[in-house]
Image (cartoon, rainbow, N blue to C red):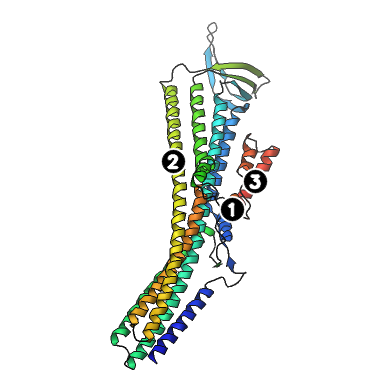
Amino acid sequence: MAGNIVAETYRKGLQIAAIGLCLSAPAGVAQSETLADALVGAYNTSGLLDQNRALLRAADEDVAGAAAALKPVLNYTANLTRNFGDTRSISTFSGLASTNNLESTNASAGLIAELLLYDFGATQLGVEAAKETVLATRQQLISLEQQVLLRAVTAFLNVRSLTEFVALRRNNLNLLEQELRAAQDRFEVGEVTRTDVAQAESQLAEARSGLATAQGDLQQAIEEYRNVVGRTPGALVTPPSLPSFGSNVEAARSQALRVHPDLRAAQHAVAAAELNILRAEAAIKPTLSANGSLNVQENLGSSSYTNSGSVGLTLSGPIYQGGLIDSSIRRAIASRDAQRGNLFEVQKTISQNVGSTYAQLSAQRASLAASEERIRAARIAFNGVREEAQLGARTTLDVLDAEQELLDAETSRISAQANVYVAAYSVLQATGRLTAKDLGLGVQQYDPAAYYNLVKDAPVARSAQGAKLDRVLKSLQKN
């Protein structure tokens, strides 16, 4: 009779566990949420992406500022002066004194124009350096996009895994509660000792602790998901098949060293530094500019006025500046060398990351296969120990230990499944292919060239292009 009680308890417990795992799956299509949904949410709501898009627009404006130096500069001046006072003089012949009033009001206005004609390319080099900085910033934005999307993948899988952990531990708790009741019933009829009951009570207390820990971990994962994706997770469905990428590590490494955004950003930074050296060297050479002015001056107390104008050419250049120019050249060279060193380190890091992520993926796949085998063996052992316990050949502790081993094996498989996905998407990031474009996400992708094309020629606010730019800015502020 006691053996039948144990068998029935475990059969019911396993049924409850199976039902619990089904309940942890998506409750319905309307409430389900896929990995792609999470990635779309992260892309659309990321404050980090918004911040760096704004930084990219600021870099675009640096190009406009540098290009403006090649255009004519027109300034105006206006002046209104009130003079007052008097002067007293004595005639040499008559000896009589006379006083003259000096009060007058003068108004003047003028226009001053200046145009850079030739500076041995120094200003144009500044424009080109700013363009390289823009290209580098664009690549940095892509790199940040990869980080945001990988964080979303990790957050999605963590919530889903921990949800399954909680379900497993809750079902395990229910199972152990039934086992404790069965042990107590058997103790009352003298089939087991008080030790068996105490062992069941100990396992139940440990299960409650494990459930509380899993629930706390799940709440933390939900908070991370809400932070990354921008909303509370719904019922997370099983992720799709792993993303496709080649199995040849060296081919992947070679591709990453050509297209990875971190590498491209470093290359553009080196190019900008090279241009800054040429720009610093050009500062030694003279500058030729044209200038002109128109002035009108009128005495408001009389009919006198003056109109004047001038045009001319100005050639200027440094003779001695205390070593400032030479220092600027050396500084530009040092900056170039630093960027070259950074490029070398980025190349090594990318190469290492490709190899490491492929190795991690291989290890996680092996871990998942081992977990499957562990579950198979643990289930066979659990069923065997349970049957032996019905015959009196095994103790309650033996059954509890076998059940715990099966629980640990199930937990290990859940972790391994999540780790395989994270490792696969880490491979995409390491090779520079974890972007909204590469993943085919259904989002309105940010076009980094759109704003640049509007501002690169430094339009004024009252032009047609300036009006279009103003509408774009207002739209960005609303978003």
- Residue 208 seen from this side: no
Q: Could you tell me which secondary element the residue under label 2 belongs to?
A: helix
44 to the left or right of 378? right
Residue drawn at the location 57% of the way across and 38% of the way down: 61
- Foreground: disc 1 or disc 3: 1
Residue to which mark 3 is pinned: 472
Marks 2,3: beta carbons within 8 A: no
Camera-nearest residue between 392 and 340 = 392
Residue drawn at the location 54% of the way across and 5% of the way down: 93
Closer to the N terminus: mark 1 or mark 3? 1
In three-dimensional space, the C-alpha distance between marks 2 and 3, rounded to whole angstroms, equals: 40 Å
Q: Is residue 102 above or below residue 263?
A: above
Closer to the N terminus: mark 2 or mark 3? 2
Residue to which mark 1 is pinned: 439
Locate residue 337, reporting x and y percent.
43, 31
Q: Is residue 75 above or below residue 430?
A: above
- The quarter holding residue 412 reads bottom left
Locate residue 355, reporting x and y percent.
45, 47
In three-dimensional space, the C-alpha distance between marks 2 and 1, rounded to whole angstroms, equals: 26 Å
Inspect the image, locate mark 1, and give the three-letter code of the amino acid beneath it.
Leu
Q: Could you tell me which secondary element the residue under label 1 belongs to?
A: helix
Crowd around label 3: few <14 · some 14–19 · many ≥20 (10 Å) = some
Residue to which mark 2 is pinned: 348
Residue drawn at the location 48% of the way across and 63% of the way down: 417
In three-dimensional space, the C-alpha distance between marks 1 and 3, rounded to whole angstroms, equals: 27 Å
Q: Is residue 121 above or below residue 368?
A: above
Closer to the N terminus: mark 2 or mark 1? 2
